Image (cartoon, helix red, strand yellow):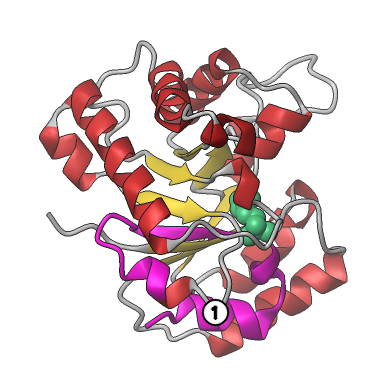
Amino acid sequence: MERKAMIAGNWKMNLNSKEAEELALALKKGLDVDLKHEVLLAPGFINLSIVKKIIGGLPILLAAQNMSWENKGAFTGEVSPIQLRDIGCTHVIIGHSERRHVFGETDVIVNKKIKAAIKNSLTPILCIGETLDERENQKTYRVLETQLKGAFEDLSEEQVSNIIVAYEPVWAIGTGKTATPDQAQDAHVFVRKELERLYGDDFAQSTRILYGGSVKVENIDQLMAQPDLDGALVGGESLKADKFLRVIHYQ
Ligand code: 13P
């Protein structure tokens, strides 16, 4: 089954409005509009509308990095799925490792947010991944299995049919220590098997699994050559236009 690749840039808590505007303009200028795969940008909340204005009309998708599971109300400091839709987001990153490990997001919270995203027609990009300690103690598969099961709790195959999964080993994020293509492929095969166990073969074969963690110009081509890597979720390297453009146009 053909899976359309996606290269996504997670800008995290970086860039002021002027810098975000400049980066979006440079990407717009350098993008091959006939690209066969998808490109997605995830700026911080305050830069979403600035970036949307620039990429509107281009084949670039817009995502938020997080959101509330509530639609509206007295939730100081939160941003709702309705607000994200209103500003032009089509996707939302859920359960990023920084949300899980710095802000204490649990699988229960991740599940609530996935449900809220789906209810509001936002495509979730579900992030999962093990820490170094878990990998060294042979717990990688168990962690991935638990995170997937938790995220998909009480959701039907139909509800999650468009979901995107991102495997981001915590030890590879922002460390310059990329998983080798073999390590990434191995984890992706495991994730796909788990997806099959949860929802069957069709679902597993059609669901895109992105890799994230120190994706760079130097390693994108080898990573994307792996059969079960359907794209990349790029942090640091997505902040520099020339580098991110090379990652987007991988070979
Ligand atoms: P880096 O590419 O900076 O390692 O970040 C990866 C990431 O967390 C993307 O969501």
Tag 1 residue: 218
Q: Residue at x 58, y 72 (%)?
A: 216
Above or below for 176 versus 137? below
In the picture, measured across the screen, residue 161 lies left or right of residue 131, that is left
The magenta segment is 222-251
User: How many numbered marks does the figure carry?
Assistant: 1
Residue lying at the far front in this picture: please name it. 137
Residue 191, percent from left and from top = 33, 37
Residue 146 appearing in the image: yes
Q: Classify the position of the C terminus by image quarter.
A: bottom left
Above or below for 104 versus 227? above
**In the foreground, 227 or 62:** 227
Answer with the quarter of the image where residue 10 lies: bottom right
Residue 226, percent from left and from top = 30, 64
Above or below for 223 versus 144? below
Q: Residue at x 39, y 73 (%)?
A: 222
- Ligand 1 within 8 Å, label 1 CB: no
**In the foreground, 112 or 230:** 230
Q: Residue at x 59, y 88 (%)?
A: 29
In the picture, measured across the screen, residue 210 lies left or right of residue 110, that is left
Q: Classify the position of the N terminus by image quarter.
A: bottom left
Q: Amino acid at mark 1?
A: Glu
**In the foreground, 45 or 165:** 165
Residue 198, percent from left and from top = 24, 22
Residue 87 appearing in the image: no
